[in-house]
Image (tube, rainbow, N blue to C red):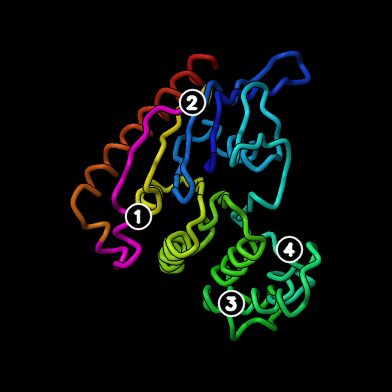
């Protein structure tokens, strides 16, 4: 079976003082190949913990992750990660960064050069392939990170606040690039973000998580990502249903934050 299954995942962190924190509880979700999922929720709802479990960086206390019929037991090239900061190799130029994965796999140089050139053209960095990464802007570095991830040909791309550090204009351009790559590659994408607007623009499916313990509170199926593939994103934000859904989710998350603050004040 192709696709990604999150099967009844729970995660508990045991503390040195004998207490414990239930970061996730009974989270279940199925993604078919090629779906784009955005994940929202207040701080402490387990978004990043869930992503780290999907990546294989953490083993869940209960449950399992299944990708294309195989249980995930650790990190693997079938799942690519794009972080908030590009996590690029500063001592390598752009071409070498993108070529790193194929080179580690032992791919012949001519083949990996062809892949790198194609991907740099796709992300608009063909003219910067010989530049050191520290010479690039933040947006350009994230383009390199995307190209490097795609060079490994993963089945699933996991994105942890990949655009959070960018200025507003660059962020919007990168959102358009993410949609373009999603549609052209057919990859399954899971995107963590704190921006409700970004989650609406990029998620054809969107889940809102609730905290303490982290769990799925509500799921949406949305038309905006599909609309945004071939349209100006600012026009998508003005399209039918966008503002209403944004306000609904903002109110939902705000109520959760208020509840958390109330608990904190009572315990204090």
**Mark 3 to mark 1 CA distance (whole Å):** 24 Å
- Residue 196 in the image, given as x and y percentages of width and height: 38, 46
Residue to which mark 1 is pinned: 225
Q: Earlier in the sequence, mark 3 or mark 4?
A: 4
Q: Is residue 223 magenta?
A: yes
Q: Is residue 78 above or below residue 73?
A: below
Which residue, given by chain and number where applicable, does mark 2 sit on? 215
Label 4 vs 2, first from the N-terminus: 4
| Quadrant of the drawing holding the C terminus | top right
Q: Which residue is mark 4?
A: 101
Q: Nearer the viewer, residue 260 or 209?
A: 209
Q: Which residue is mark 3?
A: 118
Closer to the eye: label 4 or 1:
4
Q: Which mark is residue 251?
A: none
Which of pointers 4 and 1 lies earlier in the amino acid sequence? 4
- Tell me which segment is drawn in magenta: 215-235
Secondary structure of the residue carrying tag 2 is strand
Q: CA distance from mark 3 to mark 4?
A: 15 Å
Answer with left or right where residue 161 lies relative to residue 262: right
Cα separation, mark 2 vs mark 1, equals: 24 Å
Query: In terms of image quadrants, where is residue 250?
Result: top left
- Is residue 34 a member of the stretch shown in magenta? no
Asked if residue 39 lies left or right of residue 98, the reply is left
Q: Earlier in the sequence, mark 3 or mark 1?
A: 3
Among all residues in the image, which is located at the extreme front?
1
């Amino acid at each position: 079976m192709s696709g990604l299954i999150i099967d009844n995942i729970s995660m508990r962190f045991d503390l040195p003082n004998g207490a414990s924190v239930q970061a996730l509880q009974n989270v279940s979700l199925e993604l078919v190949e090629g779906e784009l999922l955005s994940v929202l929720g207040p701080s402490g709802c387990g978004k990043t913990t869930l992503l780290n479990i999907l990546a294989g960086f953490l083993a869940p206390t209960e449950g399992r992750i299944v990708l294309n019929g195989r249980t995930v037991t650790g990190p693997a090239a079938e799942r690519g990660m794009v972080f908030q900061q590009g996590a690029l190799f500063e001592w390598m130029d752009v071409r070498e960064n993108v070529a790193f994965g194929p080179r580690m796999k032992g791919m012949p140089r001519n083949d990996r050069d062809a892949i790198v050139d194609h991907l740099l053209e796709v992300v608009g960095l063909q003219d910067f392939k010989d530049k050191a990464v520290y010479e690039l802007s933040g947006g350009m570095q994230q383009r390199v990170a995307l190209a490097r991830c795609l060079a490994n040909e993963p089945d699933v791309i996991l994105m942890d606040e990949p655009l959070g550090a960018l200025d507003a204009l660059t962020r919007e351009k990168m959102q358009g690039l993410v949609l373009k790559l999603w549609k052209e590659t057919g990859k399954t994408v899971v995107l963590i973000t704190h921006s409700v607007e970004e989650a609406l623009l990029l998620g054809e499916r969107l889940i809102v998580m609730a905290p303490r313990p982290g769990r799925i509170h509500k799921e949406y199926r949305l038309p905006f990502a599909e609309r945004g593939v071939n349209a100006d994103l600012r026009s998508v934000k003005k399209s039918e249903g966008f503002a209403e859904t944004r306000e609904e989710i903002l109110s939902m998350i705000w109520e959760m934050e208020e509840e958390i603050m109330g608990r904190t004040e009572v315990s204090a």
